[in-house]
Amino acid sequence: MWFSAPLDYAVCPNCIADEALRKAAAGNLNATECSFCGRSGESAIATDTDFVLTYMSECLQREWSRAIDEYLYDSESPTGYAGPCYETYEILEVDDVFANERFEEFVLEAFRDTQWAQRDFGGISEGEALRYGWTDLAETVKHRQRFFFLLAEDEHDDGPGSVVRYGREMLDQLGELIRKYGLIRTIPEGTLIYRCRTHKSDEKPTTAKELGPPPPTTALQSRMSPAGIPMFYAADEPKTTLAETIDEERSDEDAATIATFKLRQNCRVVDLRELSPVPSIFESDVSATERRHELGFLHGFRRDVSGPVTRDGREHIEYVPTQVVAEYLRYVFKDGDGDEIQGVAWESSKLPGTRNVVLFMDASRCVEAGKPGDGFSEPLIELVDSEPQRAG
């Protein structure tokens, strides 16, 4: 037993914030009064704290161990162990576990003599393997080997634990997680999306050619596309595309036009907004540990992909990893039915709660309302309206 606490205490589910832990407590009610909030009832409304502490200890041991079981003794270490140690409040502070301060103090006191260490400290956890693989890929394409990184020989020796995948294998693993967690969504035919183009005040762009994807010769690098490769960037609200496009500090263009486009067919996109929350460490299902690692990585990956990039002249470097991912999704990745996808969607960093989307297409698939395509490419979007805006 890794805790020590007085007997004859009971806690009600109302004093527990973590949903999984609260559910476990609610399923084992055996006391009529809560020792922490004072709530009482004629029937059982609370559970013995010994049950809750035992349940917490068993769940924590899936990812954590006692320092004494993981490390050798180190007389020069302030903790006495040859490795990083953590107090209980440190391993719980990342989650909202408690809804009652007295109960929180009770739990922390019960585990006061336990020094925690990462389970299997000498090995690599699945979450770490995913993060290492993505970090290595990002650093490789930014600073070491950009155009032939897929041909790089794997000279890594990662040691025990989960396997770290590099290069193409990392991209394939990302694709597996996208399919596993259902991140592919359909934007229905007929959906309106909005695109902003900045320009000089004496210019009046009104056509699909002017307001759609640029030609290759003028396509600038952006979050998902290198210079020279056109893609269609848009948002699901006019205010979002305006906020995402205009950079008042750097732009020398004093006007803008917001164009309204309509999808001519269904579009399948990888929607990074649709991520499930990371499961609680107190989930009763032991498979939750794997999901915690994988979803934790995907949430971090989403922050890397959708977070703001400082425009300091180095954005062409910082965008390279997401450009590599976009090219993989465009040309290699397939959904569960073996079909290709048409783009990527993510939450706007400028206006949280709204969506940006990039469609893998050039100007040949963008037409005026009701017009046919060029005979070679089936139209994906059509321009239905445009409205001049002030850029400032």
Image (spheres, rainbow, N blue to C red):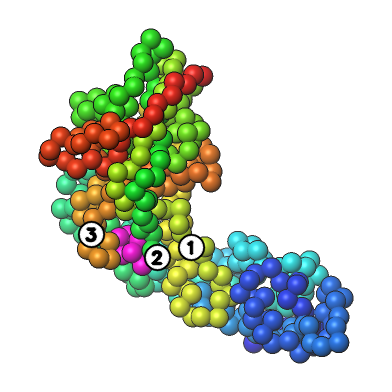
- Describe residue 67's horizontal placement relative to residue 358 as left or right: right
- Describe residue 84's horizontal placement relative to residue 167 as left or right: right
Residue under label 3? 339
> Whole-percent x and y of residue 96?
65, 63
Which mark is on residue 276? 1
Could you tell me which residue is drawn at 43 percent across and 60 percent down?
A: 297
- Describe residue 344's horizontal placement relative to residue 293 as left or right: left
**Mark 3 neighbour class, 10 Å CA radius: few under 14, some 14 to 19, many 20 or more:** few
In reply to whether residue 104 is colored magenta, the answer given is: no
Any part of residue 249 in sight: no
In reply to whether residue 179 is colored magenta, the answer given is: yes
Which of the two residues, 324 or 148, is positioned nearer the viewer here? Answer: 324
> Whole-percent x and y of residue 333?
24, 57
The earlier-in-sequence mark between 3 and 1 is: 1
Which of the two residues, 313 or 351, is positioned nearer the viewer here? Answer: 351
**Mark 1 neighbour class, 10 Å CA radius: few under 14, some 14 to 19, many 20 or more:** some
Could you tell me which residue is drawn at 51 percent across and 80 percent down?
A: 285
Question: What is the tally of numbered marks visible in this picture?
Answer: 3
Label 2 to label 1, Cα distance in Å? 8 Å
> Whole-percent x and y of residue 37?
84, 73
Give the magenta-colored segment's residue range. Answer: 173-180
Which secondary structure, mark 3? loop
**Cβ–Cβ below 8 Å for labels 2 and 1?**
yes
Which quadrant: the N terminus? bottom right
Above or below 249: residue 113: below
Quarter of the image for residue 183 reads bottom left
> Whole-percent x and y of residue 210?
29, 24
Residue located farthest toward the left when viewing the structure as drawn: 376
Above or below 331: residue 232: above
Residue under label 2? 181
Tell me which secondary structure the magenta stretch mostly adopts. Answer: helix
Residue type of the residue flagged with mark 1: Ser
